[in-house]
Amino acid sequence: MLGSGKGSNFVAIAEAIAVGKCPAEVALVLSDVESSGILDATRQRNLPARFIAPGKFRTKLDEDAERAYVAALQDAKVDLIVLAGFMRVLKGDFLRAFEGRIVNIHPSLLPSFPGLEAWKQALDYGVKVTGCTVHFVDAGVDSGAIIGQQTVAVLDSDTAETLHARIHAAEHELYPNCVAAIARGEISVSGRQVIWRP
Ligand code: GRF
């Protein structure tokens, strides 16, 4: 898993694994932020966690960092890369190394509101329903084939904070379910269509 922030999606997936709802194991958690909650939460569970410095850019990994991330993940023999709040765009060599094996969660119903602060974009736009999306990662921003989505109603009384909190809660249901389905081999992909065959 890769993350830069709090790590609440990591916790949701780790708990699903611990109670037998998701037949997977966390081989390695990497972060570009040394003091991130996701690294703390991983270490608390005695799972392997590593900070790898991202290098000189703000929104992507530099070449050395990219190589170090790929090598660490290959050494750990990961089958699937789960992005959980990793705040850097992954580029060519990384994507090629793990083609079709990288998933991400985004806090809106894609293709609406890609990019940053999607819950705020939804609130500002005035939609009545938003949610979260788990998708495969391709070379675009939040543009890969959609694996699963969960809706969240936007309330008249919502602030950016309250809406974000409810989307986060929906993420904690959706993401472990999607990872479990992939781990069970129930997911197949044909172009943009992702088929679930339990
Ligand atoms: C989530 O809201 C996810 O949609 C976005 O980053 C956030 C990560 O939260 N990609 P956490 O670190 O898992 O709590």
Image (cartoon, rainbow, N blue to C red):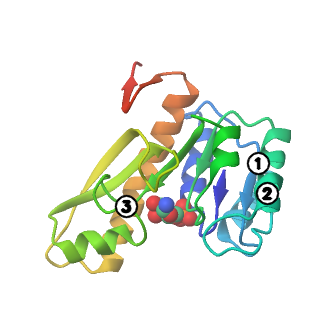
Answer with the quarter of the image where residue 183 lies: top right
- The answer to which of marks 1 and 2 sits earlier in the sequence is 1
- The answer to which of marks 3 and 1 sits earlier in the sequence is 1
- Would residue 104 appear left or right of 95 to someone viewing this image? left
In the rendered structure, which amino acid carries the disc numbered 2?
Ala
Residue under label 3, please give it: 114
The image shows residue 71, relative to residue 59, as above or below, that is above
- For the residues labelled 2 and 3, say whether their Cβ atoms are less than 8 Å apart: no
Residue under label 2, please give it: 49
Nearest to viewer (mark 2 / mark 3): 3
In the rendered structure, which amino acid carries the disc numbered 3?
Pro
In the rendered structure, which amino acid carries the disc numbered 1?
Leu
At mark 1, the secondary structure is loop
Labels in figure, total: 3
At mark 2, the secondary structure is strand
Q: Nearer the viewer, residue 166 or 110?
A: 110
Nearest to viewer (mark 3 / mark 1): 3
Q: Nearer the viewer, residue 17 or 65?
A: 65
Q: Residues within 10 Å of mark 2 (few under 14, many from 20)?
A: many
Quadrant that contains the C terminus: top left
Answer with the quarter of the image where residue 24 lies: top right
Residue 35 x/y as whole percent: 74, 76
- Within 8 Å of ligand 1, the CB of disc 3? no
Residue 179 x/y as whole percent: 53, 38
Q: CA distance from mark 2 to mark 3?
A: 29 Å
Residue under label 1, please give it: 28
